[in-house]
């Protein structure tokens, strides 16, 4: 029975690592699995960050070796994202999660229209390196996304990609690489908040991380080889499924069937 539990955690982590590296919302897989295996929702939320951190270390190193990571830009954009993540983690227990999920679902539907109807914005980004120290608008976007990531993590990669492409100007492949490092950095700080509050199961988290890292390594190589057009297709699928999940569409269909 224990081997089955361990295997389920690793498999969930593997698929989440792939999804998180290519787009985002892999936590929509891992959080329900952790809760199903008996962790309280608050502990599952904190434990999930271990896999995210180690997965992003692997993916970030892979993107760097392949020459598509703007490391300086990622560090600059991380500064305000860290502040947001600390705030989000601190208030995680005080917000209505169900209402927030519905709101995020609506935003994802709107984002889906942007991706589908204006594909050139996602495929033809011109920015290779972030010049200067970023504008207040860019930092504001990172702060808000960092705050959401500190709160629940699920879906943060999609919002981060949107900001890096539409607000800052990277194409999808380079945005993916920068996204990985920014989320890695601010998640370390958010994880510290959960550790301090005793909301992390290290054994389960490290087991999850094994799957996350394997998935991240696989996805990082595929993303660079296939290019931005292929990543955009994956993004469309992930955003559609995530929006459906958050808006309760699958639950509604299940009742009909």
Image (spheres, rainbow, N blue to C red):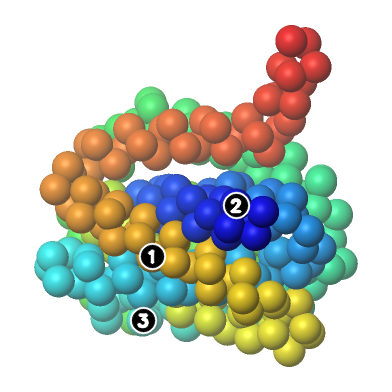
Pointer 1 local density, CA inside 10 Å: few below 14, some 14–19, many at least 20: many
Q: Spatial distance from mark 1 to mark 3, Cα to Cα? A: 22 Å
* Residue closer to the observer: 217 or 114: 217
Q: Position of residue 143 (x, y in %)?
A: 56, 71
Of the two numbered discs 1 and 3 on the same chain, state the one appearing first in sequence: 3
Task: Please tell me in which quadrant of the rendered image residue 228 appears.
Answer: top left
Q: Which residue is mark 2?
A: 4
Which of disc 1 and disc 2 is earlier in sequence?
2
The N terminus - image quarter: bottom right
Tell me which corner region of the image, top left, top right, bottom left or bottom right, holds residue 164. Answer: bottom left
Q: Which label's residue is closer to the chain start, 3 or 2? A: 2
Mark 1 vs 3: CB contact within 8 A: no
Work out whether residue 38 or residue 160 is closer to the camera in this orientation and state it.
Answer: 38
Disc 1 on helix, strand or loop? helix
**Viewer-nearest residue: 124 or 132:** 124
The residue located at (53%, 64%) in the rendering is: 208
- Of circles 2 and 1, the one toward us is 2
* Label 3 to label 2: alpha-carbon separation: 40 Å
Checking the image for residue 75, the label placed there is 3
Q: Residue at x 30, y 52 (%)?
A: 219
- Asked if labels 2 and 3 touch by Cβ distance under 8 angstroms, the answer is no
For residue 94, side relative to residue 137 (left or right): right
Task: In the rendered structure, find residue 213 and report the number of the disc placed on it.
Answer: 1
Residue 184 on image: x %, y % = 44, 74
């Amino acid at each position: 029975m224990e081997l089955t539990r361990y295997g389920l955690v690793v498999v969930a982590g593997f698929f989440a690592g792939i999804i998180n590296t290519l787009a985002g919302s892999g936590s929509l897989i891992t959080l329900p699995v952790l809760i199903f295996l008996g962790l309280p929702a608050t502990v599952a939320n904190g434990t999930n960050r271990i896999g995210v951190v180690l997965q992003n270390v692997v993916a970030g190193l892979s993107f760097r070796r392949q020459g598509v990571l703007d490391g300086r830009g990622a560090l600059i954009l991380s500064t305000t994202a860290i502040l947001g993540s600390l705030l989000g983690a601190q208030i995680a227990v005080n917000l209505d999660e169900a209402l927030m999920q519905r709101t995020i679902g609506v935003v994802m539907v709107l984002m889906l229209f942007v991706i589908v109807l204006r594909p050139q914005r996602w495929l033809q980004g011109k920015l290779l390196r972030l010049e200067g120290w970023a504008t207040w608008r860019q930092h504001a976007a990172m702060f808000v996304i960092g705050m959401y990531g500190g709160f629940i993590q699920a879906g943060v990669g999609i919002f981060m990609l949107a900001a890096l492409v539409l607000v800052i100007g990277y194409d999808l492949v380079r945005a993916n690489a920068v996204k990985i490092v920014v989320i890695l950095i601010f998640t370390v700080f958010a994880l510290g908040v959960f550790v301090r509050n005793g909301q992390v199961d290290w054994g389960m988290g490290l087991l999850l991380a094994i799957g996350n890292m394997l998935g991240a390594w696989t996805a990082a190589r595929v993303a660079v080889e296939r290019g931005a057009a292929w990543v955009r297709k994956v993004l469309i699928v992930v955003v559609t499924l995530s929006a459906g999940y958050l808006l309760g569409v699958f639950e509604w269909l299940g009742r009909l069937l």
